[in-house]
Image (tube, rainbow, N blue to C red):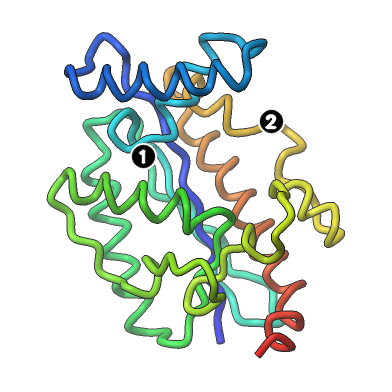
């Protein structure tokens, strides 16, 4: 059995580039967020709602790390796009590599944190937008009531928990000690896509370690 933990980072499209459909969706999501968080900075809210919807944002980085259950992982790997124009190539390379990994390791447990609700549908939607066909149904599994072939760590327990909180619970080094995803768009705009990749890789390494910690629980639930 092997774990492959993976995660994505996304960036918002500029509002002035929006079509009528994009603008309508953006205004609806922004109004909803502002009604729930009236004290939040409006620019931050606008950037966030665009980064969390595949009609309004794009994938700038995917990172993954792989290793056997009970063992330390291999070095993480990242696929990056420094601009929206590079996103199709990122997705093509990602799915090509996933296909290769899947052929050589059929007993993979795909590991994410909130991947069933966010990472999988976002990557699916952006891939289809570019005519890039996903190649792995196991990785794309989003059924909420199982942990195989996709173990979404966010779904372990019904109470809400962020990744850094799960890390604290499991005594795992937090990946958020040097910032969080809110800085990704600014880093990409500044041309520092490599720093985005390093940040994303810390997330997947933390998720991988958390998966190792909860594996006895997963086994006990069978």
59 w.r.t. 36: above or below: below
* Pointer 2 local density, CA inside 10 Å: few below 14, some 14–19, many at least 20: few
Residue in the image at 32% along x and 15% along y: 14
Residue in the image at 87% along x and 59% along y: 171
Q: Which mark is residue 59?
A: 1
- Residue at numbered disc 2: 179
* Pointer 1 local density, CA inside 10 Å: few below 14, some 14–19, many at least 20: many
Residue in the image at 23% along x and 46% along y: 89
**Picture quadrant where residue 158 is located:** bottom right
Residue 60's spot in the image, x, y percent? 39, 37
Badge 2 element: loop
Q: Residue furthest toward the left?
A: 131
**Picture quadrant where residue 87 is located:** top left
Residue 207's spot in the image, x, y percent? 65, 59
Name the side, left or right, on which 131 lies relative to 168: left
138 w.r.t. 156: above or below: below
Q: Quadrant of the N terminus?
A: bottom right
Badge 1 element: strand
């Amino acid at each position: 059995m092997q774990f492959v933990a993976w995660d994505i980072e996304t960036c918002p499209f500029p509002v002035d580039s929006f079509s009528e459909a994009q603008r309508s969706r953006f205004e609806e999501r922004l109004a909803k967020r502002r009604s729930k968080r009236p004290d939040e900075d409006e620019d931050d809210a606008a950037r966030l709602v665009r980064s969390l919807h595949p009609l309004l944002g794009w994938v700038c980085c995917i990172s993954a790390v792989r290793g056997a259950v009970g063992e330390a992982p291999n070095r993480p790997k990242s696929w990056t796009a420094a601009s929206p124009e590079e996103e199709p190539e990122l997705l093509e390379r990602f799915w090509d590599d996933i296909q290769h990994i899947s052929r050589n390791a059929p007993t993979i447990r795909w590991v994410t944190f909130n991947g069933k609700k966010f990472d999988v549908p976002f990557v699916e939607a952006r891939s289809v937008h570019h005519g890039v066909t996903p190649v792995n149904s196991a990785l794309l599994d989003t059924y909420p009531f199982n942990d195989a072939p996709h173990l979404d760590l966010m779904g372990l327990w019904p109470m809400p928990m962020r990744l850094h909180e799960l890390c604290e619970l499991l005594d795992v080094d937090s990946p958020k000690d040097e910032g969080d995803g809110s800085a990704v768009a600014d880093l990409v705009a500044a041309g520092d896509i490599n720093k985005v990749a390093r940040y994303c890789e810390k997330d997947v390494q933390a998720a991988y370690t958390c998966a190792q910690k909860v594996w006895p629980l997963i086994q006990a639930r069978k």
